[in-house]
Amino acid sequence: MKHLSAAQVARLVDVDPGARPYYRALADGVRALIMDGRLPVRVRMPAERHLAESLNVSRTTVTAAYDLLRERGYLESRRGSGSWTALPDPAMTHDNPWLTTDGDGLVQLHCAAPPAPTALRQAMLEAVEDLPRYGMGNGYDPMGLPVLRERIAARYTARGLATRPEQIVVTTGSQHAIQLVLGLLVAVGDPVLVESPTYPHAIDMARQRSARIVPVGISHEGWQTDLVIGAMRQSGVRLAYLMPDFQNPTGALMDDATRAAVVGAARRSDTLVLVDETWLELALDEVPPTSPMAAFDTDSRVISIGSASKLWWGGLRIGWIRTTAALARRLARHRSVVDIASPVMEQLVVARLFDRLEETRAERRRALRASRDALVSGLREHLPEWTFTVPRGGGTLWVRLNGDAATPLAEAAAGHGVRLAPGPWFGLEGTLEGCLRLPYTLPPQVLTEAVTRLRTARDKGPVGPPRPADSLIAMV
């Protein structure tokens, strides 16, 4: 197909006649068709005047929609020759706010995941060069490729925790790592301690094991050591899941004294400690030096997990577990009930990215600082009633709504183009309704726009038919 008539485009684009502003809804509709493949790239679009007639709108409206499509890279035009569908230059994607939305056009503030760093492309090219020699094998290594396990072990050693490659199991993301550990070590009815709030999928996986969940409240200020220790002792906790490094969602950082005290209490109560270090590498400001929690472990009860998703890119789906060599082998055997091994290509890419770790950390700091500052400024200007502590690292703000309820707000915000993660997602049933997690992993201009939409949603409520904030959507 070389060109589309105005009638064809009008039939394909599903735009609510009451949408406001209509030109943006029209542009979003065309963009969705291009991304879905229903409008091929390099197809000539109808003239603005003809499309306006078919849609029964003003030509100015269609002109504004075409201008927005051109601005975002989905339309190319040449004077006197017309306009063609296109895809944005990949170099534009970091600053392209449309690529932060999914198929329903909502800004994805429920997901704390940054875009790929600039180092990814070169790492992928190098991994392709590495791949042929691995192709001579069967591609299945339940422990993970030795080259990647060596890089991960070396990083732990550099942090002051001597580690051998045989202590590492490569997983298909940190969520997979949590699933493997709980699946092997937690039985039905076992008490599992979690922070409140915490990573929602950790709660989901504890429930999947039919564990008895023991919540311990934390805040921006961090952990109350006596509460954590008391819960371990009184509940006979089998395993404690903790995020001491820029905790998701509060951003809190656990100091060494608390780390040592918690590990000591775990030893006395015979509790395993599963430490999630997913956000570890993303300190944005100067912070006091801390040791890995496993550095305080004297009897091999601390199991550490990490991930490539925050420092590098979630699309790589690579994580890891650090534990004893014996438990690593047991975990590798146990994973056969979930999968066989992690993808070879992605492992090779992450191995190459470890060679660019400091470069990527610097890039992430620059981008996340700018986004954090934009989000903080926007909230203080437009929603000053809401309160929060600015974290010194990680990727999220944990906001207290001071009278507003998070779930109705999330439903209203969806009607204004923003998908939110309300507080109850991060706790047990019925709790945390007065809180909201807002990530700053999107570009500053997207966050600035999102905050103005949030204020409108808070002040005016939902518009049009309700669009529920779907808690089944993957959220990190």
Image: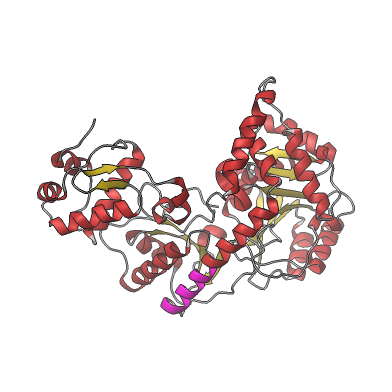
Question: Viewer-proximal residue, 227 or 400?
Answer: 400
Position of the N terminus, as image quadrant, is: top left
Image color mode: secondary structure
Q: Position of residue 407 (x, y in %)?
A: 43, 63
In the image, is 247 to the left or to the right of 51? right
Q: Position of residue 29 (x, y in %)?
A: 27, 48
Q: Which residues are magenta?
A: 372-382
Vertical side of 126 occupied by 231: above or below: below
The answer to whether residue 472 shows anywhere in this view is no
> Residue 39 is drawn in which quadrant?
top left
The residue positioned 75% from the left and 36% from the top of the image is 147
The answer to whether residue 23 shows anywhere in this view is yes
Q: Position of residue 464 (x, y in %)?
A: 25, 60
Is residue 192 located in the magenta-colored stretch of the structure? Answer: no
Q: Position of residue 410 (x, y in %)?
A: 41, 62
The residue positioned 48% from the left and 73% from the top of the image is 401
> Residue 343 is drawn in which quadrant?
top right
Vertical side of 35 occupied by 202: above or below: below
